[in-house]
Amino acid sequence: MDPQNPDSFNHRTERLYTGHTYHFVDQKPEGYDPKRHPTLLLIHGFPDLWHCLVSLPRYGWRYQIGPWVRRGCRVIALDMLGYGGTSKPLDPENYSTKKLCADLVALLDLLDIKRVVLIGHDWGSFTVARFALYHPNRLLALVMLSVPYTPPSKEYIPLEEVVRRAPDFGYQLYFASQKSNLEILANLNKFLRLTFSPPRSTMNYHRKGSLENLLLRVPDKKRPCVLNDKELEYYHSQMKQGMFGPLNYYRTSKLRHDEELAYGLDSHLREDLPVLFMWGTKDLTATPFVISKSRKFISKYQDVALEGRGHWVMVEAKDEVTDIIGNWLESLTCSMPGTAGDHHAKL
């Protein structure tokens, strides 16, 4: 595997029994044996992809894939629903977390994988945490990046009220509106620079109305960005296909709440499930209060703060993310029931 050469990865596209088609990369270690080698399933967030499919220097999961495979893990990295080579339905109902988790189960079933280590960033972090509640017996371990665990709520809290309580989530009101689809598309390059702005930037688009103002009314200029020009060019080429799919994730809050309530989803993760949370101390989405609260619902919990880093930890701290997660996994011994002799895989 050469991170500079996307053709050196093993690409697959499969139709699942849920009806959706998923593109993913599936890399196996040398001498792969499902009884001995655990599988890591990598789930990206907004606006991201499995990795950059051109010769770019750093972004996405691709710099993690090789090292983790060499440590003896099978690594699968998806284009999530609405992105890249995966199905892009227009109806937001397809993007509820319960349905996304059903897609992930269908993928594991297709690949005959009984249990998996789930690793998610941003929306991917929220999704893998909910997967741990909906399908607890399909997990060996859980890693969340940037977005801390939040338990299901018995009472529906509209997004407007969430923003009133936490003003730095104000941008989500814009993403949830239908007008954002075409407005972002018409100003895509500026939007990507805003989204991938560095944590030390004085430009804050998180508050209600700020993103629309910067996007639609402030003159365009070359703003600070954690991506280089080639990376931005690639993201532009992918996202110009349409923003309906990626933005639909922000239009599911009521759907998600109703599904969780109907299912009777628990607030606590499985007691024996190892959980690692990593975040940048300059990330406005990872508040100390929420991080502290999440500990009450996770028995085997470890967290790592990346000092001075922002939301895009896989860019800003790619080597640290690779090594810390790899070392943490190696410290675990996970049982893999359902294999001959109930083998134990050393992660």
Image (cartoon, grey):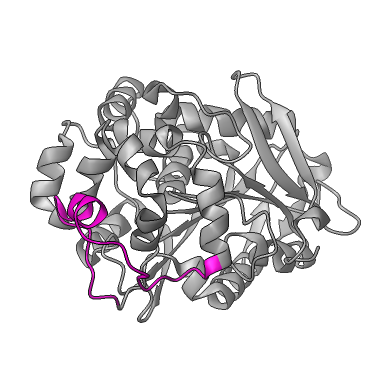
Q: 151 or 337: nearer the eye? A: 151
Q: Judge whether 79 appears above or below 231 on screen.
A: above
Name the residue at 47% across, 41% down.
Answer: 132
The correct choice, above or below, for 201 with respect to 76 in the image is: below
Place of residue 2 in the rendered image (x, y in percent of width and height, measured from the top left): 79, 66
- Which residue range is magenta in the image? 201-229
Secondary structure mostly taken by the magenta-highlighted segment of the chain = loop
320 is within the stretch colored magenta: no
On the rendered image, what quadrant is the C terminus found in? bottom right
Does 56 sit left or right of 71 as displayed? left
Q: Quadrant of the image for the N terminus? A: bottom right
Relative to residue 174, is residue 37 depicted above or below? below
Query: Residue 206 magenta-drawn?
Result: yes
- Number of numbered discs present? 0
Left or right: residue 175 compared with residue 59: left
Q: Position of residue 60 (x, y in %)?
A: 57, 60
Relative to 277, is 7 on the left or the right?
right
Residue 315, position as x, y percentages in the image: 51, 70
Q: Nearer the viewer, residue 243 or 70?
A: 243
Q: Quick check: can you spot residue 147?
A: no
- Along the line of sight, the residue nearer the viewer: 60 or 41: 60
Outermost residue toward the front in this view: 219
Judged left or right of residue 82, residue 282 is left
Whether residue 219 can be seen here: yes
Give the residue furthest to the bottom.
307
Rendering quarter of residue 157: top left
Q: Residue 133 location, x and y as percent?
A: 43, 38
Q: Residue drawn at (22%, 65%), measured in percent from left and top?
A: 204
Q: Residue 295's quadrant in the figure?
A: bottom left
Q: Residue visible at 80% across and 48% down?
A: 10
Q: Is residue 15 above or below residue 209?
A: above
